[in-house]
Amino acid sequence: MLYYRSSSQPASGGHPIQTGRLRALTTVPLLAYPAGCIIRLNAPEAVIADIAGFALILLALFCVALVVPSYFQRIVGDEKQNLDEFEMDLRRRAYTAAYQGFSALTLIFVMYFGIASDAQEKLPWLWTPSNFDHWNAIFWGGFLYTVLLPTAWIAWFVGAPAQEEE
Amino acid sequence: MSDKIYNRISMLRAERNESRKALADAVGVNYQTIGYLERGEYNPSLELALKLAEHFELPVEMVFSRQPFPPLSAQLVKLQQGG
């Protein structure tokens, strides 16, 4: 899991980000990346679609860059010995929820892929991954989801850290 | 889901004019964890509860309770009435 520890604050507990902003920063990439890939892969000849798709993918990466040094991402990604018992408990719950979410998404994709492959002759408009670019986009999407789903769960289901009230 | 455990950490900390960071350093947790404990959003382990009680030099049942603590003003009135 990704977590960036600032060299200027090596002992810090992660960069504080307001919960509302963190919710947006973790949700936008989960939506923008697949949207960008779908736009790009389905209109490879159209320049505008290409630019729009790239813009969405860059937006997703920009949001991830802002999330990586955050307090919640530290809980998800830092080494175990740097976390206290509350943070370890939160990590366990976040991993469990993210595992269930990722498993559900994978199952849906496999079912869709199976149906779309079987029904290619009757339903040729159903998209299936067929070349390196398609599988590459799916691989990095999977990577993005495994990195961000636990942090997104914490951002949505756990209260704000204390410093926001001080 | 376990039952909520009530605590007096914020009051005891305020009495001693101690910051969350100082308390967190004393008991070996992140200062944000103290915030979650004070708001009752996390029930500490027995080890952490004992560490906090030792830090405040109080019996653990005076820091943590399964029932809400009565307000300080109500306790003072009770004391004045000789209760």
Image (spheres, coloured by chain):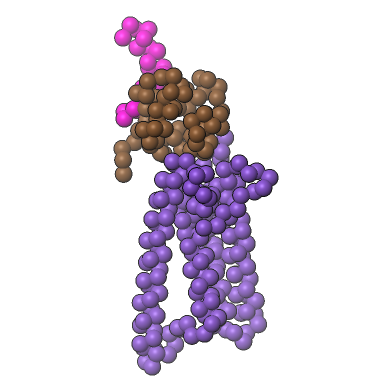
Chain colours: A purple, B brown
Residue at 34% across, 23% down: B61
Name the one closer to the observer, A98 or B14.
A98
Residue B72 on the magenta segment: yes
For the image, the number of numbered tags is 0
Compared with B62, A34 (above or below) is: below
Compared with A8, B76 (above or below) is: above
Q: Position of residue A65 (x, y in %)?
A: 61, 58
Q: Which residues are magenta?
A: B65-83
Q: Position of residue A64 (x, y in %)?
A: 58, 60
B79 with respect to A149 (left or right): left
Residue A155 on the magenta segment: no
Residue at 48% across, 30% down: B27
B3 with respect to A89 (left or right): left
Compared with B1, A39 (above or below) is: below
Residue lying furthest right in this view? Answer: A8
**Residue A132, quarter of picture:** bottom right
Quarter of the rendering occupied by the C terminus of chain A = top right
Using the rendered image of the protein, determine whether residue B35 is visible from the camera's viewpoint.
no
Residue at 44% across, 41% down: A86
Name the one closer to the observer, A13 or B3.
A13
